[in-house]
Image (cartoon, rainbow, N blue to C red):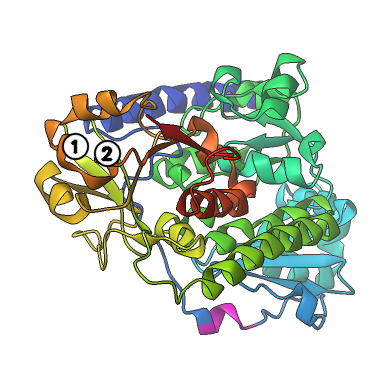
Amino acid sequence: MRKNNYILKKIKLSAIISILFSMLFAVMGCSSSYHNDQMLVEKKIISEDNLDVIPKIVGLKSDKVTESEKIKYAKGFKIYYYNNKKYKLVKTLNDRNYLIVPDEDYQDYMAYKQEKAKSAKKKQFDVKKYNCWSKYTILNQNSHNIYLVASSVMSLFKSIDAMDKIKFSGTNVDSWYIEEAKNAMREGQILYAGKYSQPDYESLIEKKCDLAIQSTMILHTPKVKEKLEKINIPVFIDESSYETNPLGRLEWIKVYGEMTGKREQADSFFKEKIDMVKKIKSQVDSSKSVKNKKNKIAYFYINSAGKVVVRKSEDYIPNMIKLGGGEYAFKNLKNTNSENKSGAVTISMEEFYVQAKDCDYLIYNSTIDAPIESKDELIGKNKLFEKFKAVKNNCVFNTDKYLYQSSDSMAEFIVDINSILKSDYDNFIFIKHIE
């Protein structure tokens, strides 16, 4: 009891320090919202060739990965199986690797770590095995009290019917756009346990949290990750935001399928979405010979300083525009700071005017800024918009606020883009026509 009280006191002190750091980030202009990805994150990248090397794990025998089990679009992870799929390894491009093990093995390993399993010490083989396992983050296949901080992952859990595994949320009820998540919190099935930088450690301990799924924002507060692990809550970092291919982002659903024992449902859902995109791509390819196409699109928002924030050319949003049959307005646009892994690029209104004034369509990104309700409101942000071709032709659109939480709906956004190009404005899911 005294030891637990001591730990909690240290945690409270560290939480105060975390709050001070969060205030510092705020002063520096960095948002604490997960979907605002304009912060610098240092990534430890290993080669893709190394990602393909199957690790040898003491006590486990690797299985052959079948063609249907291979990862097709995502570049950031691979999944390997051992002992007839009893054990699963998620290996990432950023050299963060996770071994998913059965509950019994997990409990033995945790007891070994805490030096309570005398039987494990007596078995030399187990010591070798657990020493090898210490290279990885060990996850319990039976995790069912998950602390979900990476808000974009909730939709993936919803899509494989695994929301019952989530007990805690890093997003409060009013900030959810996913109705199932909002309702679960209202009914007390999911509890708010603080944002990524300020977890409610006491609640997580009391209610036996067994896994934290964090976004890459946790990399800005490494002490929080360390504290979670110190109280025996393993941390999984979702890195799907690093994927430039939207289908690669969606393919991370397979990781959560493995985590929850629902890989079959994940594969089925993924195939359904891929088929949707292939259908659109077939239509786009068949119309490529059409002359005088009107398909040039600018995707942007205006920040509080009056600057225009667009996406770099290789980002997943421009790639969704391309898959939908559109042409992104900015070619070869990159972050001037090579260390900045964000997909967002800030430019002046004058630069934006030169590149986008003749665009056929303007799409205002409302996942960051408030939605615009009319063309006049857009012009109110800057008079130059009066001169834009898309504004004159009544071809201005708005994204819905909940797009950033809908990782499961990449295919639907691509369909929306295609609908814009076909002037079919009646069946949008994430886009709204602004007049």
Instruction: Judge left or right: residue 25 versus residue 45.
Output: left
Give the vertical position of 84 relative to 277 (above or below): below
Residue 82: x and y in percent read 82, 74
Q: Nearer the viewer, residue 70 or 205?
A: 70
Q: Residues within 10 Å of mark 1 (few under 14, many from 20)?
A: many
Residue type for callout 1 = Phe
Dominant secondary-structure state across the stretch colored magenta: helix
Q: Is residue 105 magenta?
A: no
Q: Which is more toward the observer, 330 or 23?
A: 330
Splitting the image into 4 quarters, where does residue 302 fall? Answer: top left
Amino acid type of the residue tagged 2 in the rendering: Val
Q: Are marks 2 and 1 in contact (CB under 8 Å)?
A: yes
Question: Which residue is at the front of the view, 113 or 187?
Answer: 187
The circle on residue 391 is 2
Instruction: Using the image, determine if residue 45 lies above or below residue 164.
Output: below
Residue 245 horizontal/vertical position (percent): 50, 64
Q: What element does badge 1 sit on?
A: helix
In-image side of 297 versus 316 (left or right): left
Quarter of the picture holding the N terminus: top right
- For residue 384, side relative to residue 378 (left or right): left
Please provide percent x and percent y for residue 9: 53, 21
- Going from N to C along the chain, the mark reached first, 2 or 1, is 1
Question: Residue shown at 21%/29% (left/top)?
Answer: 379
| Mark in the foreground, 2 or 1 | 2
Image quadrant in which the C terminus is located: top left
The stretch drawn in magenta includes residue 50 = yes
| Residue range of the region highlighted in magenta in the rendering | 49-53
Badge number at residue 385: 1
Q: Name the mark on residue 103.
A: none
Q: Residue at x 53, y 68 (%)?
A: 284
